[in-house]
Amino acid sequence: MKREAIANAGLALLLLAVPLAASTMGEPFYITLATRIAVLALAAVGLNIALGLGGLVSFGHAAFFGLGGYAAGILATHAFNAEPLFFGIPSTTSMPVIWLVAMLVCGLIALPIGAISLRTSGVYFIMITLAFAQMIYYFAISWPAYGGEDGLSIYVRNSFPGINTARPLPFFLVCYGLLALGLMLFWALRGSRFGAALQAARQNATRLAAVGIPPFRIRLTAFAISAMVTGLAGALFADLNRFTSPSMLSWHMSGELLVLVILGGKGRLFGPVAGAMLYVLLEYWLGGITERWQFFLGLILLGVVLFARGGLMGLIAGKERHG
Amino acid sequence: MVDPVLEIRDLRKNFGALKATDGVSLDLLPGEIHALIGPNGAGKSTLIHQISGSLKPDGGTIRFLGQDMSGLDMAARARLGLARSFQTSSVAQEFSALRNVMLAVQARQGSSLRFLRPVMRDRSLVEPAMAKLERVGLADRAHVPAAELSHGERRQLEIAIALALDPKAFLLDEPMAGMGPEGSKRLTEFLGNLRREAPILLVEHDMDAVFALADRISVLVYGRIIATGKVSDIRNDPEVRRAYLGDAA
Amino acid sequence: MSTALLIEQLLNGLQLGVMLFLMAAGLTLIFGVMGLINLAHGSLYMIGAFACALVAAATGSFWIGLLASLVAAAAAGAIVEILVIRRLYERDHLDQVLATFALILMFSEGARWLFGSFPLYLDIPPLLQGAVPLPGGGQYQLYRLGIITVGVLVALGLYLLISRTRLGMRIRAGESDREMIAALGVDISTLYTVVFALGAALAGLAGAMVGALQSVQVGMGEPVLILAFVVIVIGGIGSIKGALFGAVLVGIVDTMGRFLLPQALTLVLPPSQAALVGGALASMLIYIVMALILAVRPSGLFAAQS
């Protein structure tokens, strides 16, 4: 337990220190790399609520990641063109409003998707979440109003009151702050009554029902919260790249999000952070060595799944224990 | 005549051609231990599953405290006050014994949609849970993960969870199974006192325990109840002796 | 709209369904017997297409290419099963998803490495070039009819294989009780390799046949894979009958939706809007159908286990 706390603090400091150092040395690229890590980690924190705590293997979380991205992209586009959204409501480039919209949209869409998917379990659940995400993906591709296959550019990064988000370091700090909030939420949920019921639903759903708590309601709530956090990360990701596209909704993205959680260690507080660091650094490092980096990424991932169960946090901090 | 707590009438369940529950009627009266016995394959588990709500009957009614339970799922029945223990221990393996009982306390208190306050610092959960563990003699193992408890300890934990629900009736599915003679003796004594809090429908293979505890016994054979009565009546019932006790006693 | 056009679209739907069946049959067989969810099934489809295109180009014969696609996909399947997949049978579905996701990355990048990013083209064999007349006027591509015929023959063959042969008996036994089949003295790891290779060969066959209609390129297996997942979820995972039914349903609903929805919407919307909304709805249609079916039957139409 203590080793894990030290490892967590180390990861948190490392992720903060590198961009600060890069900023003083005038290396904005490393700040962007760290921002990418923070945003992907936040998306994975969201998935970790469903997967790590609730045991819900969602193979469709790209849907929420992408919806968050489109929320940012669509609001920015309307604001940029000074077109009202609907019923004459003006759009906005204010990040807090955009985040709220992204989370609201994801929560509302997660409820019906979750309600149908959670009637099933096991492989069915995996495939149904995948299929729903594909449905949204194909909708985004075939609906030309917001770029269709080509995606949607955000010409000016959205704004945050009192902060110049166009500069890499302030934007990193915004993302880092939200990641910290996301981790605090995960921590609070895990220790709460809701978290107790959710983890019990993963370990033994019959037992949970036998004490009078319906597993379905608990899981559906968790699925929606999880989708909202991942959606928030999606909005940040769109602002990071100043671009939203159907690829954020693709099943590769869903797979990547699962990979982040598993690489780091599912159910662990800092698992998603460790996973995102490892993944982005591997991508960067392998990409620098060979054009065929995806092949080797696959090889490493295969090795982790077959031989290093428990992920990076499992290796660093040992087996997890519950209070 | 007092109203029964649990009232089963003409319950039927078929699996294909097999009549697993064939017109079963059964009452559980306040303050009693009603034992349900029968040879393997008689349909005891099927009956328990239908009462607790994990299996839907094909026909008949189950009323609990006067209310028809047919539309209710397992969780809703538990909330009405029907506490069930499982034949093979079924607990949250990664949680400590204490957290397993706390989950039941939490369920008893109402909504689980509370997201922020840490349960381990919530005295309204920890203290009642600890008290139940003490009652079953498991207090010194409170912080051990359920997966690391011995078989007998897990049976005790099941009872503690049931107690924490503060139920109107207990549905205990072979609570003695796999317990040593010492443990069985203690549990027998414990259950004997428990009937004062709520009546118990007891499915059990341990005949010593059944004869020591039961106020009434029902004998289930091939999905039908062939006899119901006091211990002495059942012991002397010729049909029961032939169908069941003959090869056991 | 003319009858001929409608019949043509129905046949297109049937052809898509047949092709999906070849994919779905393998997926569902592998899941039914070994309990494994295999994302890399689309890679085997791609391998079949590449093998067919390369061998056909080298030998000048589509038919030798088709044979090569079966052999290559089955061999790739067997090798992957022995090296990786058999370590996954005892794992949970999450591990299976991740490991086979990793395999996709490796196969796709490997194919790009070997063959480059440019698509290969595969010609329709001379024997099946041309078209046949349809009732009500119009014509239909002979090659597509050929695909439908192959699909029907494969479905028949699978039925006979599973119900009449020793291998089929073992497959059925493996589905119901793994320990029993081991106790019968059947070498279970060989059986698993054979089943996996069989599924792979069917995927490779599908890839090769579709390769002549479209182009042969990296990533071609992925959209098909996801449709095949929809098929087996609708049909009930583990059920070959369900896979057949689901495949034809998905093929026809998808094709007819794309054909009819934009036209139907012109009744209530202006034409440009109707095409837009109709197109978007049509691309989501099979997922909506799937959601409806699962809302009523959460484990599919022909679920193997209750």
Image: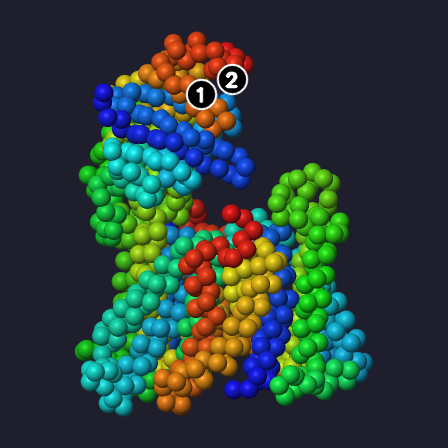
Can you give x and y, in whole percent of width and height, for residue A153 in the image?
36, 85
Q: Is residue B191 left or right of residue A88?
A: right
The kind of residue on which mark 1 rests is Ile
Label 2 vs label 1: CA separation? 9 Å
Q: Residue at x 47, y 15 (%)?
A: B240
* Residue type of the residue flagged with mark 2: Ala
Q: Is residue A121 visible?
A: yes
Q: Nearer the viewer, residue A273 or B23?
A: B23
Q: Residue at x 58, y 63 (%)?
A: C245
> Disc 1 designates what residue?
B226
Q: Is residue A298 above or below residue C52?
A: above
Residue A122 badge: none
Q: Determine which quarter of the picture holds residue C54.
A: bottom right
Residue drawn at x 72%, y 39% as measured from the top left? C184
Residue toward you, C56 or C32: C32
| Circles 2 and 1: CB atoms closer than 8 Å | yes
Total numbered circles? 2
Left or right of A30 in this view: C206: right
Q: Nearer the viewer, residue C136 or A4?
A: C136
Q: Secondary structure at mark 2?
A: helix
**What is the x, y in percent for residue A64?**
37, 68
User: Which residue in the protein does label 2 denote?
Assistant: B243
